[in-house]
Image (tube, rainbow, N blue to C red):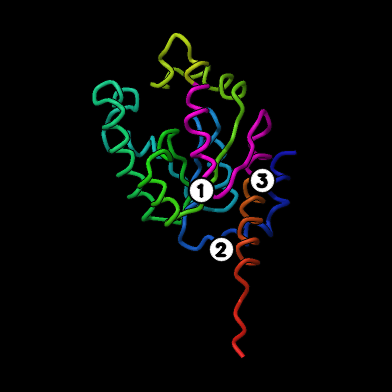
């Protein structure tokens, strides 16, 4: 089950685009959840541009995310992140992948709600550990106990991520499959919105 999964959702894709309008699909979740990888697949399936907020931040600052953390600290990084995400959201529709801490900022959450549909890619601890262990560019995991750090982040952030419009479980599965599940979840979400707001009788 690969591209067939996405092809099978052609009708759903059209409906998602119709309901989306000028809004963006915004992926939130912890590092290693697959926001960029799945976001690219969803963007390709829907024919939308894809933006990674961390890459935008690096382009703007001409520094890597780890360098920004080291030189300016997390608070300054989050302030820059907020400004970049607000600017990106003004240029929708698109698929936007955000950094793990972005959705924790109340102003950023409000901007996402106003200009997009948030999708939380929810992963368990073992899945996250397996993925982040392969990369060395995770500033928050430069710690003797990265598993413990991730556990603490899950406790702190998962209740906030749960405020996202949609939650889609992610796991050790092909990206095409998870992307198709995201599109179907969006389709159901918009369908429920329609049923909760039926067209008014104009007679």
Q: Do residues under tags 2 and 3 come within 8 Å of each other at their CB atoms?
A: no
Answer above or below: position of 71 versus 185: above
Q: Nearer the viewer, mark 2 or mark 3?
A: 2
Q: Is residue 170 one of those drawn in magenta?
A: yes
Estimate the spatial distance between the alpha carbons at disc 1 and disc 3, rounded to whole Å: 16 Å
Q: Quadrant of residue 128?
A: top right
**Disc assigned to residue 27:** none
Instruction: Estimate the x, y position of residue 148 in percent, counting from the top left.
Output: 50, 16
Answer above or below: position of 83 versus 34: below
What is the span of residues highlighted in magenta in the rendered image? Answer: 150-179
Q: Residue at x 44, y 39 (%)?
A: 98
Q: Quadrant of residue 195?
A: bottom right
Disc 2: which residue = 19
Pointer 2 or 1: first along the chain: 2
Q: Residue at x 67, y 57 (%)?
A: 12
Instruction: Estimate the x, y position of residue 175 in percent, counting from the top left.
Output: 63, 36
Disc 1: which residue = 118
Instruction: Estimate the x, y position of residue 86 in percent, counting from the top left.
Output: 34, 49
Estimate the spatial distance between the alpha carbons at disc 2 and disc 3, rounded to whole Å: 17 Å
Q: Residue furthest bottom?
A: 203
């Amino acid at each position: 089950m690969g591209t067939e999964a996405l092809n099978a959702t052609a009708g759903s894709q059209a409906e998602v685009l119709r309901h989306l309008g000028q809004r963006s699909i915004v992926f939130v979740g912890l590092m290693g959840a697959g926001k960029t990888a799945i976001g690219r697949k969803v963007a390709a399936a829907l024919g939308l541009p894809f933006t990674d907020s961390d890459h935008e931040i690096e382009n703007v600052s001409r520094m890597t995310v780890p360098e920004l953390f080291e030189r300016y600290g997390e608070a300054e990084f989050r302030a820059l992140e907020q400004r970049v995400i607000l600017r990106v959201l003004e240029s929708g529709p698109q698929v936007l992948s955000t950094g793990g801490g972005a959705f924790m900022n109340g102003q950023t959450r409000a901007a996402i709600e106003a200009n997009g549909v948030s999708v939380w890619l929810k992963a368990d601890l073992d899945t996250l550990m397996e993925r982040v262990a392969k990369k060395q560019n995770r500033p928050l995991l430069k710690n003797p106990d990265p598993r413990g750090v991730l556990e603490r982040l899950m406790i702190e952030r998962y209740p906030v991520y749960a405020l996202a419009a949609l939650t889609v479980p992610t796991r050790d599965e092909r990206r095409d499959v998870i992307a198709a599940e995201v599109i179907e979840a969006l389709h159901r979400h918009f369908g429920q919105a329609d049923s909760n707001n039926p067209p008014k009788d104009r007679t």
